[in-house]
Image (cartoon, rainbow, N blue to C red):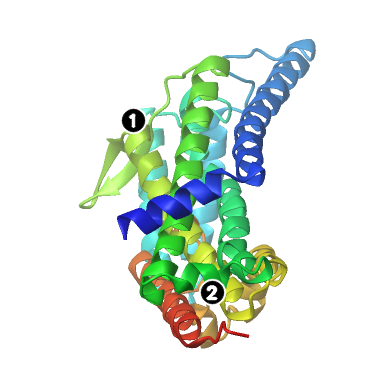
Amino acid sequence: MLKLLQNEWMKLWNKKATWVMAILLVVGVAGMMGLTKWISTMEENRAESGGVSVEGPAAAPDWRMQAEAEREGISAQLADPDLSSSREAELKEELQIVEYRLAEDVEPHGSYSRQQMIKDSSGIATLAMLFAIIVAAGIVATEFSDGTIKMLLARPVRRWKVLTSKFLATALFGALLTLVGFVVSVAMAYILFSPDAGAELAVRSGEVAEVSVWTLTLYHLLLAFVNVIVYTTFAFMIGSVFRSGALAIGLSLFIYFTGNTVSALLSRYEIAKYLFFSHDLVALAQGITFIEDVTLPFAAAVLVAYAAVFLVVSYLVFSKRDVTA
């Protein structure tokens, strides 16, 4: 199995397209961070030219005013008699944090602070996922279109091992791109942005406590990678079943980009809870969801179940497919 995996890994990196995707990821992440820095500088200059005193990495409205407005908004939502119990619990925790900030004078991180940029770097997984989908879609389909599948399966190796090596190579590629994107993002955050005196807060055992930005970011990155694996597995299944990389890429990206819209439209129906594109684990961890009564463990279980089904379908079809024709 290890030799098969090594072979697939070498075949993957022998393609120019793989290097192009890796370079695009690095350039894209660095470019986005540079653009964010430019925007923050423009906002600072605009505030200074307007006679507004600027403190911290970038100009921003007084955080206390924002916290007061947030507290009023949360209180209004809690007054809704139709509020679900899970959503009520989330709002109460949010309110507890806001009230703690105001009482203890603990400001949040600024929008353009180094800490906030590091925290937002978990979003890099989305870009890594797009490239991983491209690889997953073609890693099996290309063998059929190039006519190399007969040679590959002529060796005395079980088909499931061949398919497993291809899937693992794809998953490792997605993990590598996610890690590289994260490292570049953090490096650019240290180069371009200044830290501030803010703090990240969370409710632990009923009490508000300060949490490390690094701990929170790595947790979100892990959650984001679960979504990467699920969409990559879906593309892998479509490419394996229909032997079409283009179909796998197109269908995967279509579902990804339209998933939130479909989820919002179906949010009032029970079926929405059981659709894999309805669940963004990072958004759920931040208390953002279109669907009521969906918890993070439930969403994770749904995604794992879908990934398992996608893999089972891939193995069944690939193992029984006739490649002699």
Residue at figure coordinates x 65%, y 42% from the top left: 16
Residue 18 horizontal/vertical position (percent): 60, 45
Residue 302 horizontal/vertical position (percent): 41, 75
Callout 2: SS: helix
Residue 159 horizontal/vertical position (percent): 41, 75
Q: Quadrant of the C terminus?
A: bottom right
Q: Quadrant of the N terminus?
A: bottom left
Q: Which residue appears farthest toward the left when viewing the image?
A: 205
Q: Quadrant of residue 24?
A: top right
Look at the picture and state if 248 lies above or below 316. above
* Kind of residue at badge 2: Met
Foreground: disc 1 or disc 2: 2
Residue 19 appears in the figure:
yes
Look at the picture and state if 242 lies above or below 112. below
- Residue that mark 1 sits on: 104
274 left or right, relative to 258? left
Circle 1 residues within 10 Å: few <14, some 14–19, many ≥20: few
Q: As rendered, which of 141 and 189 lies closer to the eye? A: 141
C-alpha separation, residue under disc 1 versus residue under disc 2: 52 Å
Q: As rendered, which of 300 and 107 lies closer to the eye? A: 300
- Residue that mark 2 sits on: 237
